Image: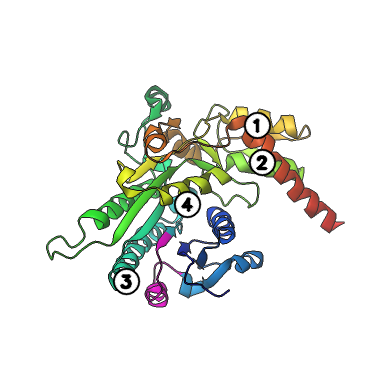
Amino acid sequence: MAVHDSQEMVLITGASGELGQALIKELGNRNSAVIAADVRSLPPELTRYCSVVLEGERGDVTTSELGYALVEYPITRIFHLAAVLSTAAERDPVRAHQINVQGTLNILELAQAIGQRYERTVQVIFPSTIAVYGFASVHDKHQAGKVTEDNALEPRTLYGVTKLHCERLGIYYSHYYKQLSGEQSWVDFRALRFPGLISAETLPTGGTSDYAPEMLHAAARGVPYLCFVRPDTQIPFMAMPDGVRALLLLAQAERSRLSRQVYNIGAFAPTAAEIATTVAEYFPSASITFQVDTRRQAIVDSWCADVNDNAARRDWGWEPQYDYVRAFAEYLVPAIKQRYATVTTENV
């Protein structure tokens, strides 16, 4: 795909993940020149939306190869999605720290270098997480209610620790970069703390909040699902289209309207039992049982039950299009049924 002068040039790291794939489609349909970078291969059907695809070592945020490949491109906006998620991060904290922290540092340096080269600000849009919050007990978690951005920042997982650290790194690069040398910062860092994201189009990738989409996909496939958290477990969730919308709304917001650089966003916060009941209403043959994985349960219990997203609503007009009922009725169930009907037809 050729790049035209009128096109906005956007870099997406971690492009082959759930959020990255959804974002590529949306930006491609908006006629942006998309540069997709990931150590994994991008699904072939997505390459038509991209101007440049960097895979393997060339798409690795932890090496210098990505910076060398991209510093001359007039990129105006970076969606830095590459990260090791919660459960995988606990299993390999050294690797998670390298990717989540060093990778983010490399992207901030790349944004600064591109900004210096073209003498204009480069946005870095960063998906953070509710894992930055931490509670000592389920009682404390529910007593806190909807948490604001500055409360309970006591993460209890490596994933949460690295994301909170990267939020602070981004703020530093925006305001205090090389303050002793007097050099100008060209980085406009903006972050969203995502709840659990539920996608109908891509398979769950093993995140600690993936029990919700895993229930749905298992029911649609007609296979039993053993849920790894208690029925009363509660954290906030969001439909994937709203997650993509939120990233784009924040990216498009006038900088002067932003009262902060890190924002909560929310949509709905059901218990695991409520999700199982709803799934069974749409898939009557669903078999969902509960067997607690104590380690993963402890992680989810430390996260907030819900978030206060008033700042995002006030500053840049955030409002989810999908509440709990609409997310299932109009997005998740129809798309997932179609997905597996197609798979079944192809296998016949």
User: Which disc number belongs to residue 85?
Assistant: 4
77 magenta-colored: yes
Q: CA distance from mark 3 to mark 1?
A: 52 Å
122 and 275: which one is in front? 122
Q: CA distance from mark 4 to mark 3?
A: 34 Å
User: SS for tag 1?
Assistant: helix
Kindly report which numbered mark, 2 or 1, lies closer to the viewer in this rendering: 2
Identify the residue at the far left of this view.
180
User: Which segment did they paint magenta?
Assistant: 60-78
User: SS for tag 4?
Assistant: loop
Q: CA distance from mark 1 to mark 4?
A: 24 Å
Kindly report which numbered mark, 4 or 3, lies closer to the viewer in this rendering: 3
Residue 107: image location, x then y, percent: 36, 64
Q: Is residue 176 left or right of residue 55?
A: left
Task: Please report the residue visible at 47 percent of the width from the left and 50 percent of the height from the top.
Answer: 248
Task: Please report the residue visible at 71 percent of the width from the left and 45 percent of the height from the top.
Answer: 336
> Neighbour class for label 1 at 10 Å: few (<14), some, many (≥20)?
many
Kindly report which numbered mark, 4 or 2, lies closer to the viewer in this rendering: 2
Kindly report which numbered mark, 3 or 2, lies closer to the viewer in this rendering: 3
Residue 134: image location, x then y, percent: 36, 36
Q: Is residue 114 left or right of residue 28?
A: left
Q: CA distance from mark 3 to mark 2?
A: 42 Å
